[in-house]
Amino acid sequence: MSAQASGVRSKSAYLVAIVIILFFWQVAAWFLPDFLMPNVPAAFVRLWQELNSSEFYEGLANSMSRLGIGYGLALLFGIVLGLLGGTLNAVRSPLKAAIIILQSIPSIAWVPLFLILMGFGNLPIIVVVAIGAFFPTALSVMNATESVEKVHISAARVMGASRSQLLRRVYFPAVTPELITGAQLAFGNAWRALISAEMIVGFSAGLGRSLAYSGEIADMTGVMTNILVIAVLAAVIDQVILESIKHRLLRYQYL
């Protein structure tokens, strides 16, 4: 299957899924009172109002900046630590065990600790986002590094490659497919961590804070509109941005 056909098929599946979700949402709205479950047209009217307000774009910009910084740091440190852990036998087993143990802790559980240590601000949210994305990235890179063909490593060493050259010329290209898969999984973790942290910290505008505020004032139309924005935006980032990067880096797999 070509890259174009694969991309069209994937995006079509997302559109079908969105239509099905909206259908069941509307069915639920027919059987529940408006103050509990607003109908789909009411949510779209609210969404149009939000799209014409500066507060919406301020919150969106805040959330995207926190996501970008936290997710970027997670990828950077996850790749570096994953490569080192996968190539250094002395630290491989304990490091992998530590990652497996720590990734079982929900990202949101770290929020109270970081609020005490760092105070209210962007920093605790960014750190929580980074933690959420770091573990799947590091673990995928480490697992991929362990499976690199030994003959390739031996050939590079015979040709006089240093450890840094081995990392750059042998290990990193070999782990790229698994890294990209891990990065997509990490995005899901980072996105959920971002929204959850913003809901709890709630010191300034953001998608999570907007959702939490709507719940606090029992504005169910606002709640459902925010949920719709969060879900669709995540799908767009995954399918438009991350999938595009994936197809560019792994184009040989889609020929």
Image: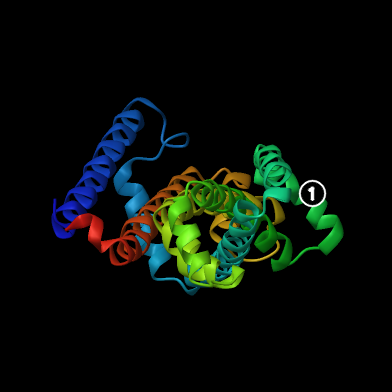
Q: Residue lying furthest front in this view? A: 158
Disc 1, SS: helix
At which x and y percent is residue 137? 55, 53
Q: Nearer the viewer, residue 76 or 232?
A: 76
Q: Amino acid at mark 1?
A: Pro
Task: Please name whichever residue, 82 or 198, is drawn nearer the observer in this view of the structure.
Answer: 82
116 shown above or below 244: above
Query: In the figure, 42 relative to 152: above or below?
Result: above
Q: Residue at x 73, y 61 (%)?
A: 124
Q: Quadrant of residue 128?
A: bottom right
| 224, above or below 247, in the image | above
Residue sitting at x 28%, y 44%: 18
According to the picture, the residue beneath numbered tag 1 turns out to be: 112
Q: Position of residue 242 (x, y in %)?
A: 37, 61
**Where does the C terminus fall, quadrant-wise?**
bottom left
Nearest the eye: 41 or 5 = 5
